[in-house]
Amino acid sequence: MKSSKIQVASPIILFLASFGAYIYTMCPTISTGDSGEFCAASVILGLPHSPGYPLYCLLGKIFTLIIPFGNLAYRVNLISVFFAVLTIVILAKIIEGLSNPSPDLRSPLPQPEVGYSSKGERIKVRDMLNIIVAGLIFCFSTTFWRSAVQTEVFTLNTFFVAVLVLILSRKPLTPPAGGEDIKFIYLTAFLFGLGLGNHHTLVFISPIILWKTIKTWKSIRGKLFYIILFFSLGFSVYLYLHIRSFKNPGLDWGNPETLHNLWRVISRKDYGTFALTVGEKLARSVPVTIKQIGRFLTTFNHQISVVSIIIGIFGWVVLFKERIQLAIMYFLVFVMSGIGFILLANIPFTAEVVGILERFYIIPLFFFVVCTGVGIIWLSKKIKYAGYAGITSIAFLLLPLFLIHQHFDECNFRNYYLTYDYGRNIFRTLKPESIFFMDGGDDTFYSMAYLTFAEKHRQDIELHDRGGLVFRNIYGSDFRSLTKQEKEERRITTEKSYLGKKPVFYSTFNKKVLPGAIIKQNGILYEAFDSDKLTVPDSWSGRPTWQFYSLRNVFSYEYRDYRSRALVPVYLFMHGLARFGLARGGNGLAPDSKGLLQYWTYAYDRWDEVGWLETNISLGLHEVAYQAFQENKLDLAKFYYDRILYLNKSDINALTNSGVIAEKQNNIKLAKELYLKVIEIKPDYTEAYYNLGVVYWREENWEKVVEMFSNVLRIDPNHQGAKQYLPQAIARLKETR
């Protein structure tokens, strides 16, 4: 095989292999997360969440127009496939450039033999196989594969990383003939600005850009104006947000019609510039930092396997020995975009957060796999093996084959309809001309956005998120600046004004979402009624709605990603509520209520890592347990509290109330054990000390009574019960002495 044919074969093989794998495993419609939002924004040229992703929306629109087959989401999904495949090909070219460098780059690897001898051709075939192996390792890494088969911005972001690294690592910025090869500098500036119009994490490759800037400073300093101009030209893609906002598209996040709002969207003020989500952040400490680093290393290992990591370390050592400046730049980007970013974000160690963080492993993984490719080539040239020269390269093919075996199930979205069907099931619940309020939940927001704005379903309904950000804000232009209490008051006033005028529905787990209204469950939603104008029978439950739901693959499919696993149990949880009677005004104490716990128990046993599920099951069980206690059904109340402790053995309310039940059933030993366990979990919990004092009072153990009541007053000096009875206990203690 001629040398030129070998060089062409490598990218073609990589392109076909990765494209075929991605098309086969690609999601046929929207998936969880931001997928529905990006698909809808692409179709209607809308504005998704901050920072607006203007480049992705424009490309999405182009793909929906030029691709003549598939539904709209399928066409937008192809953006991820297309740029993922290009990224893999470019990654291979970068590795090839390190082994066959352009004139100003010295190779860190032993040089291949020149000529067309049989031995030389075998070496070139071996090098081609090595490069293909490295490309396939990246292709089948968990997060990149998953990002490549659904609508997300991360493969496009990695494409810009790859292109810029290719330009900065392979192309000489100062040609041997002299004079400034300024076109590559201008191209770099333009692509960097344009790429930031897709995702801000592109900024992590700044060390490489800065390195090249310093190396060529004398030549380029007179061209700074034009360099800034080209960067600004690329970055000007953000003007899309300002221009389209005046058209008031269905998705108009942040309403950037003013420069103030535009900057607020671009800078992600609603999140914090370096925040991944709106919500809890951990306090910084040495143990937390160590745990964050451990999380990064564990997840990184899952991406490409231990063997690939070891080879990558070899490759990095080789790169450091031969091209130390470039190796340092790669390492800086790896650390900044990987461990550095994880430490900067500093978000909790929950299953939900793991799903959020995974996508941010792609950039550091890209640079590591480049070094893995260097390591594979170096090892294959150092290992002497009798017989065919490419035998070691064929052995290296086991690495991507292992990744396919390991990751196929969690990255295969071929028959994934969960999110699409969830949105359609909501539509099957909503009555004609309904107004639908969404109390949080990206999968609800964005499935609704896609189905209504892109596919034009149910144009009779009116959609609103209760945060006033995603859909048209009906709570007033000042809503975002109000306090939490003021926002809630505004929501209640605004939403109540629709009662009696049109059907009002809610997506929420809060049955008291609209105080003063009658709230009844209807399938997976709640419907609100005006308590002054309409009486709804207690027997009404909306149960017939369940018969019309599509539940394909809901329970038979083993979803691996957190967002999907968090969406599936919505059906079981809400169906359990309907069967209990809790959501329609009942108390859940039907004779067969214990048996009906099977819905919630099954859901928790299968998806126990889902935070909202445990919280809401516990709240529901607390409600029915307390009701049973009030009706003196102590065995039933104990049963429910035991269920709560099955979910969370540290639930202090369930432990405390179980102690009270044990007291009433004269099981004093158990009561004391439960109260002491509460104190062990929460040493400042006054209720446990007080109840334990009452138990000791019954036993006339006055020394312990004084100790317990004193602890209560130490924690809460205003506790009325302890203040009243402590003097009596002290007096009785003195009498015994």
Image (cartoon, helix red, strand yellow):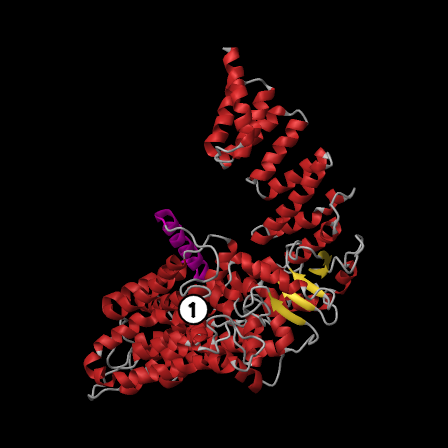
* Callout 1: SS: helix
Q: Quadrant of residue 454?
A: bottom right
Q: Please say whether residue 539 is one of the residues in the magenta stretch.
A: no
Image quarter hosting the N terminus: bottom left
The reply to whether residue 610 is in sight is no
Magenta stretch mostly in which secondary structure? Answer: helix
Q: In this view, does 191 lie to the left or right of 215?
A: right
Q: The disc labelled 1 sits on which kind of residue?
A: Ile
Question: In the depicted view, which residue is nearer to us: 166 or 243?
Answer: 243
Question: In the depicted view, which residue is nearer to us: 497 or 297?
Answer: 497
- The answer to whether residue 657 is above or below residue 133 is above
> Residue beneath label 1, please?
394
Q: Quadrant of residue 416?
A: bottom right
Q: In this view, does 729 lie to the left or right of 428?
A: left
Spot occupied by residue 159 in the image (x, y as percentages of width and height):
42, 76
Image: magenta residue range: 285-306
- The answer to whether residue 67 is above or below residue 509 is below
Spot occupied by residue 97 in the image (x, y as percentages of width and height):
32, 77
The reply to whether residue 607 is in sight is yes
Q: Label 1 neighbourhood size at 10 Å, few (<14), some (14-19), many (20+)?
A: some
Spot occupied by residue 421 in the image (x, y as percentages of width and height):
67, 67
Q: In this view, does 338 lie to the left or right of 429?
A: left
Residue in the image at 58% along x and 53% along y: 612
Q: In which quarter of the image is residue 314?
A: bottom left
Residue in the image at 56% along x and 51% along y: 609
Question: In the depicted view, which residue is nearer to us: 717 or 211?
Answer: 717
Residue in the image at 78% along x and 44% along y: 590
